[in-house]
Amino acid sequence: MTESAQYQRPDRWRDTARNNLWLVASFVPAICVQLHFPGIDALLPGLLISLQEKRWKQTVWIALCCILIQEGTGSLAFGATILWYGGLLLLFLGGRWFFVTNSLFFVVLLSGALGLFNIVVLLSLTTLQKLAFPLERVLEQSLAQALIIPPLWGLAMLTRKKVFRHAESGV
């Protein structure tokens, strides 16, 4: 093993530990936001950052954790969160062909699209379950979701850059 490879290994472990600690720590305030604003997915910015960093294995684990948390607290039948995060993935992968994914413009555009997608998901699932579709409440919730993603993402990126100095390098 070369001398440079020996010195990189401890840094990589430290960065991985710092990354995992940040992810766990970021879930706590996100869950608190969700307690105060029902119907809002505050876990999404962490998942979005993982997508932006192209950490695919990490993204799968975060998505699984988010799905378990969201499905356990939701009132709709199982599958709403899977559709929600599937829509995020499709919109992200489609958008990355046209935009720089770690820009504020992309995040604002994506959050607007997710706000509209939220209406589609809720309309579809309430129709399938033969539940009432409170249009005004769903519109308010979808607008709130679209408006809250960019500031939460920005705050998460600021803390991430402070805690994990190599966040953009994908190391």
Image (cartoon, rainbow, N blue to C red):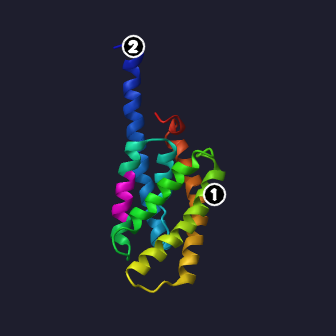
Q: Which mark is residue 3?
A: 2
Q: Nearer the viewer, mark 1 or mark 2?
A: 1
Residue topped by disc 1: 108
Picture coordinates of residue 169 (x, y %)?
52, 34
Can I make out residue 46 in this image? no
The x and y percentages for residue 11 are 41, 29
* Quadrant placement of the N terminus: top left
Q: Nearer the viewer, residue 83 or 1?
A: 83
**Lower position in the chain sequence, tag 1 or tag 2:** 2
Name, please, the residue furthest toward the top: 2
Give coordinates of residue 61: x percent, y percent. 35, 50
Q: Is 28 located above or below residue 139 in the figure?
A: above
Magenta segment boundaries in residue numbering: 62-69
Neighbor class of circle 1 (other Cα within 10 Å; few <14, some 14-19, many 20+) is: some
User: Is residue 102 visible to us here?
Assistant: yes
Q: Is residue 93 magenta?
A: no
Q: Quadrant of residue 132?
A: bottom left
Assign a secondary structure to mark 1: helix
